[in-house]
Image (cartoon, grey):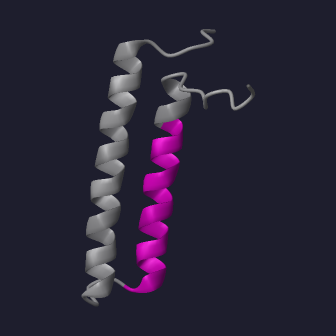
Amino acid sequence: MKDYATFAETMLFHANLREFANRVGIVCALESGHKLTPEDAYHRVKKLWKSLKRSKRNLHIRAPDTTC
């Protein structure tokens, strides 16, 4: 198993992150416009979050070290 993501994997994750943010924005707008219930909006965002986490794991993206 690799320790670090390649440049291409990192770029793909950033694209996935932008898509996540876009979709969350849409869900929030639908909830604000009373087209979705707060519970439905929560479950949709939770599903999107799980998908983003799965993408991160599959692309071997790690958080940067915070030690100096």
Indicate the quadrant containing the C terminus: top left, top right, bottom left or bottom right. Answer: top right
Q: Residue at x 51, y 33 (%)?
A: 56
Furthest toward the bottom, the residue is 34
Q: In the image, is 65 to the left or to the right of 45? A: right
Q: Where 46 falls versus 35 (above or below)? A: above
Q: Residue at x 60, y 9 (%)?
A: 2
Residue 37 location (% of width, % of height) = 39, 86
Q: Residue at x 75, y 28 (%)?
A: 67
Residue 12 location (% of width, % of height) = 33, 27
Indicate the quadrant containing the N terminus: top left, top right, bottom left or bottom right. Answer: top right
| Membership of 29 in magenta stretch | no
Furthest toward the front, the residue is 68
Q: In the image, is 67 to the left or to the right of 3? A: right
Q: What is the span of residues highlighted in magenta in the rendered image?
A: 37-54
Q: In the image, is 7 to the left or to the right of 56? A: left
Q: Where 18 falls versus 6 (above or below)? A: below
